[in-house]
Image: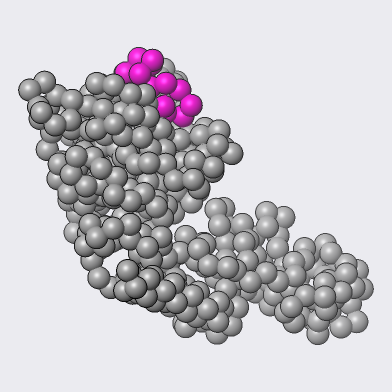
Amino acid sequence: MSDADPAPASGATSAASAAVTGDAAGADAARGNRGGIQLINVTKRYPGQSVPAVDDVTMTVPSGEIVVLLGPSGSGKTTMMRLINRLIEPTSGKIIVAGQDALGLNPVELRRHIGYVIQNAGLFPHMTVATNIGLVPQMLKWDKDRIAARVDELLELVDLDPATFRGRYPRELSGGQQQRVGVARALAADPPAMLMDEPFGAVDPITREHLQDSLLRLQEELGKTIVFVTHDIDEALKLGDRIAILDKGSRIAQYATPQEILLHPADDYVEQFIGGGQAMRLLKFSRVADVPLQQVPEARPEDDAAAVRDRIAAGSTAFAIVLDERRRPVRWIHPEDLDGVTGPIGTRGMPTATPIRARNTLQQALESLIQIDHETVPVVGPRGVYRGTVTLATLQNAIRDMKERTRARRRGADAT
């Protein structure tokens, strides 16, 4: 677990603090911060302590994003997460969760609407997997059939076969399986926000990587607001939409996207904290969604062949992409596929390669492009919806741009 606190903790965690950057604030304002979290001038001072555990912290966790709290022991991570969940009460300040003043709500009721995942899963050993997952819905007075259906739905969501796992006890599960059940339990009542305190810290590196990938896949589908505590910089870079790097005394040294932190560390403390190897980390942790995607003409199976030929002729590529009714990529189609065709294009063309997810890293995308025969690969977001295409040239240009920005930053630092 992370920071030790002067006060006892019951199950864990911490939340962040940081001056809100303009883009985070603007995005949240546009969404009304529906599922977001805000800490406004929050201070926690324990009796007999000369220095506050959390000192006048203000930050916004934008709705639908993963914000990672990263910092050394004593930087206030655990204290701040407990403040969000009201496991402890602030000395002063205001906390907003999903648009509601958390300090004005019943603490028990608040916790039932915030998912909570801790290290070692925290499952009740005497309860089955199904009972563990259904605990909060049961407290919310859901009927048995609805709870059973939700348990099975969530087990499938975290890649555990309901028929195999619903009747098992935690002692019969591996560490990775227990953590998956812990995530399912946190999602049981479909909370708008989740708190995760070093949830993958107690498993082996391979299992940890699989759990990280599973969390990103779930987040792509569900879009929860997540505060995630870790001490691992690589985990933070992989998972975080934004990272709050904390210093002693709950000072927010930098609150930005992983790419911004790697390219533009705010100060010497941040630069030392993230360590070297920024160029390789940019490739490993920058996401496909961060680079400009190529757009090609689009078509639907019911579109007229003549209209599709015109779109291809007017576009910058010699082909179009055919999308289904849910805007998922299906096929590439070239003008020669339409020779002599009148009416709808139907099933003409050739299947696309397996799409690359927008949340994939540039390194993963590069590996995919090298291993397949297609030069152009579609990129998809949540629910497989088409967002654009990527090529080796796309990635080369993005990496070249990142390297140039890194060189420019270094030249600026040398000049000062």
Residue 292, picture quadrant: bottom right
Between residue 31 and residue 361, name the one nearer to us: 31
On the rendered image, what quadrant is the C terminus found in? bottom left
- Magenta stretch holds residue 105: yes
Q: Is residue 94 left or right of residue 398?
A: left
Q: Residue at x 55, y 77 (%)?
A: 394
- Magenta stretch holds residue 269: no
Q: Residue at x 32, y 18 (%)?
A: 107
Q: Residue at x 81, y 85 (%)?
A: 336
Over which residues does the magenta segment extend?
Answer: 96-109
Q: Is residue 136 visible?
A: no
On the rendered image, what quadrant is the N terminus found in? top left
> What is the x, y in percent for residue 150?
44, 34
Q: Is residue 197 left or right of residue 38?
A: left
> What is the x, y in percent for residue 317?
72, 79
Residue 287, picture quadrant: bottom left
Image vertical order of residue 208 relative to residue 396, above or below: above
Residue 321, picture quadrant: bottom right
* Structure colour scheme: one colour
Between residue 330 and residue 27, name the one nearer to us: 27
Q: Is residue 337 left or right of residue 55?
A: right
Between residue 132 and residue 62, name the one nearer to us: 62
Q: Residue most toward the front? A: 416
> What is the x, y in percent for residue 113?
40, 26
Q: Is residue 381 visible?
A: yes
Q: Residue most toward the left? A: 48
> What is the x, y in percent for residue 110?
36, 22
